[in-house]
């Protein structure tokens, strides 16, 4: 099944909005004939023109765009929350210990 991706391009001085290229991978390039006396047209290029893309890349291969990589967010949310909660608790425990030691030092208490 075809994948649609956005490849952001560097902005120029005259750009109203960030330029980009539409990338369609895992898809065979296709053209359609509009009639006997008309030229061929590429529906992916028509889509790119409509959405304001500078161009379109259509390829049967797979293109990995690092800016579009979401594998870091693909972990189960319960695991991520547990890890975050554990880290926060460890930080709070260390802060509480440091606070207690500071209070003891100010009071001159030795335990």
Image (cartoon, grey):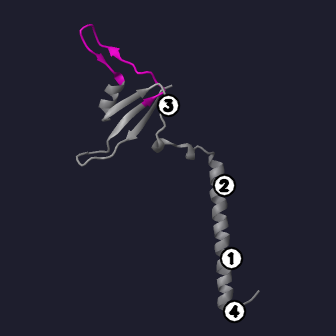
As rendered, which of 81 and 62 lies closer to the eye?
62
Proximity of marks 1 and 2: CB atoms separated by less than 8 Å = no
What residue is pinned by disc 1?
97
Mark toward the start of the polypeptide (2 vs 3):
3
Residue at 66% from the left image edge and 72% from the top image edge: 94
Instruction: Tell me if mark 4 has few (under 14), some (14-19) or many (20+) residues whose alpha carbon lies within 10 angstroms of its own.
Output: few
What residue is pinned by disc 4?
108
Instruction: Tell me if mark 1 has few (under 14), some (14-19) or many (20+) residues whose alpha carbon lies within 10 angstroms of its own.
Output: few
Image position of 90 (left or right of 53):
right
| Residue furthest to the top | 36
The answer to which quarter of the image holds residue 71 is top right
- Marks 3 and 4, how far apart at CA: 67 Å
**Dot label at residue 62:** 3
Residue at 34% from the left image edge and 15% from the top image edge: 32
| Residue furthest to the right | 111
What residue is pinned by disc 2?
82
Magenta span: 24-43
**Dot label at residue 66:** none
């Amino acid at each position: 099944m075809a994948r649609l991706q956005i490849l952001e391009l560097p902005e120029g001085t005259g750009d109203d909005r960030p330029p980009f290229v539409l990338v369609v991978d895992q898809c065979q390039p296709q053209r359609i004939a509009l009639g006997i006396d008309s030229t061929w047209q590429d529906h992916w290029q028509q889509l790119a023109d409509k959405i304001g893309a500078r161009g379109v890349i259509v390829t049967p291969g797979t293109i990995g765009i690092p800016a579009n990589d979401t594998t870091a967010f693909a972990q189960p949310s319960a695991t991520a929350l547990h890890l975050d909660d554990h880290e926060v608790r460890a930080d709070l425990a260390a802060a509480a210990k440091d606070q207690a030691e500071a209070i003891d030092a100010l009071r001159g208490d030795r335990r």
